[in-house]
Image (cartoon, helix red, strand yellow):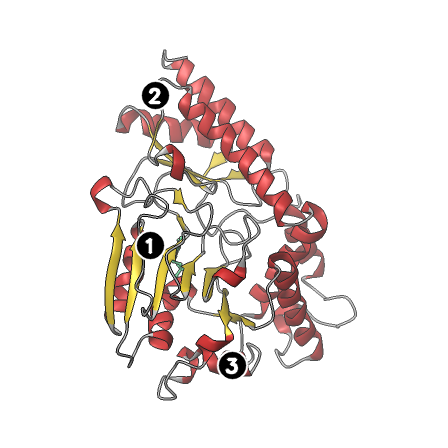
């Protein structure tokens, strides 16, 4: 029997996505029995003191990595980022006379807006649709109403591959960020945000757990009439144990935070690695004399999802097939836009990105464009 290690490919999937190998190996070692607990994490009550400690450790790991100031709650929820598309307006907008403002920088921001429209008044303050979401607003060009209920951005658009490398200065309204596909890729000044949410299955853990970091004053806004699960206060008051939380997911998020803290050396180091990895691919795009055409404008390129096209659909098909033969998987672009997408999240090793870059170079020269 093999342990599966030899069969692993370089997985460029956009999510669920590659996880750090040491995290998987620890989970594998502990799956039958958590040290000293007589049972697996999968079998343990969420009220068990050992699980309460696992949850506290995951929270403490995030607090340490992101330097989360006092005055914020960190919640572990279910329902994915899409439930947050609704929970954000349900808690922060519904029933108020104010407007929620949205910056639409891609497909996910657009989906978030649709859900918010069901709950209250919204206004789009910038939309990149006219250029197929290949760019972000020019810094300083967009301003939110100071009285807005909140202003929503998507820090990294997973499908189009555009990313805010730092917080846009939009004004004093609480900044709400869907950080699903770049959470933990760099240090984040949490104090600039009212609320940050992220599904875990790209950078932070497995599918099934969603992290919400919310400023305490925003917890007070929701009506008591909201269904209990949908009210952030329920989860904040019970420390994410209002109902049974996704225990295995929280355990893995905890292991990922430990990996980032102790093996990577923190988010500043992670950021440097991510810059270097993405540069390998973008340099290859730029050197390809138009053979590989990047989707995003250079100033707004994502460090997480590198999106590009080849000269035609047949060449893209051949590229994907040949990549798969070389154990480079998950490269097909999102079904809504096509093309190629290389997702190079935190856990993708530089060796994987180098292997992809080398393959891209070779493929291009085979096609007479080297
Ligand atoms: N927002 C972004 C930026 C995403 O990339 C995704 C998933 N790809 C979502 C939201 C939706 O997440 P979920 O499937 O967990 O609801």
Residue 132, label in figure: none
Task: Return the residue nearer the eye: 227 or 92.
Answer: 92
Q: In this view, does 84 lie to the left or right of 48?
A: left
Query: Is residue 4 visible from the viewing direction of this image?
Result: no
Quadrant placement of the C terminus: top left
Query: Hey, which quadrant is residue 254 in on the image?
Result: bottom right
Task: Return the residue nearer the eye: 347 or 275.
Answer: 275
Residue 237 vertical placement versus 185 (above, below):
below
Q: How crowded is mark 3: few (under 14 residues within 10 Å), some or many (20 or more)?
A: few
* Residue displayed at 45% across by 50% down: 15
Q: How crowded is mark 2: few (under 14 residues within 10 Å), some or many (20 or more)?
A: some
Does the CB distance between marks 1 and 2 fall below 8 Å? no
Q: Which residue carries the number 1 mark?
A: 108
Does ligand 1 reach within 8 Å of label 1's beta carbon?
Answer: yes
* Residue displayed at 42% across by 68% down: 79
Q: Which residue carries the number 2 mark?
A: 291
Query: Hey, which quadrant is residue 51 in on the image?
Result: bottom right
Secondary element at tag 2 = loop
Counting every numbered tag in the picture gives: 3
Q: Which of marks 3 and 2 is in front?
A: 2
Q: Which residue lies furthest to the left in this view?
A: 130
Residue 243, label in figure: 3
User: Residue 85: x, y in percent?
Assistant: 35, 65
Q: Distance between the residues labelled 1 and 3?
A: 28 Å
Q: Earlier in the sequence, mark 3 or mark 2?
A: 3
User: Residue 74: x, y in percent?
Assistant: 55, 70
Q: Earlier in the sequence, mark 1 or mark 3?
A: 1
Q: How far apart are marks 3 and 2 (CA)?
A: 52 Å
């Amino acid at each position: 029997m093999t342990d599966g290690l030899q069969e692993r490919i370089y997985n460029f999937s956009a999510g669920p996505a590659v996880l750090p190998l040491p995290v998987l190996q620890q989970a594998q070692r502990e799956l039958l029995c958590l040290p000293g607990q007589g049972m697996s994490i999968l079998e343990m009550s969420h009220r068990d003191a050992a699980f309460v400690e696992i949850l506290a450790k995951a929270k403490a790991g995030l607090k340490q990595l992101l330097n989360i100031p006092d005055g914020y709650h960190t919640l572990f929820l279910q329902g994915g980022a899409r439930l947050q598309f609704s929970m954000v307006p349900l808690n922060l907008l519904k029933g108020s006379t104010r407007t929620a403002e949205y910056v639409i920088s891609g497909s996910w921001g657009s989906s978030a807006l649709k859900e918010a429209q069901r709950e209250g008044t919204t206004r789009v303050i910038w939309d990149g649709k006219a250029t197929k979401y290949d760019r972000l607003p020019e810094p300083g060009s967009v301003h939110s109403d100071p009285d807005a209920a909140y202003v929503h951005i998507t820090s990294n658009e997973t499908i189009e591959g555009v990313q805010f490398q730092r917080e846009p200065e939009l004004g004093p309204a609480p900044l709400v960020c869907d950080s699903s596909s770049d959470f933990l890729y760099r240090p984040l000044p949490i104090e600039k945000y009212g609320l940050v949410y992220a599904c875990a299955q790209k950078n932070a853990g497995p599918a099934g757990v969603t992290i919400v970091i919310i400023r305490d004053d925003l917890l007070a806004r929701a009506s008591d009439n909201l269904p209990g699960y949908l009210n952030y206060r329920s989860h904040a008051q019970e420390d994410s144990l209002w109902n049974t939380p996704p225990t295995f997911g929280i355990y893995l998020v905890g292991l990922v935070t430990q990996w980032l803290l102790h093996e990577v050396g923190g988010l500043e180091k992670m950021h440097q690695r991510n810059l270097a990895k993405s540069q390998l691919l973008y340099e290859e795009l730029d050197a390809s004399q138009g053979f590989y055409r990047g989707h995003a404008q250079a100033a707004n390129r994502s460090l997480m999802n590198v999106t590009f096209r080849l000269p035609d659909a047949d060449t893209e098909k051949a590229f994907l097939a040949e990549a798969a033969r070389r154990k480079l998987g998950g490269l097909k672009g999102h079904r809504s836009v096509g093309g190629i997408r290389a997702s190079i999240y935190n856990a993708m090793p530089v060796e994987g990105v180098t292997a992809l870059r080398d393959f891209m170079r070779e493929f291009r020269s085979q096609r007479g464009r080297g």
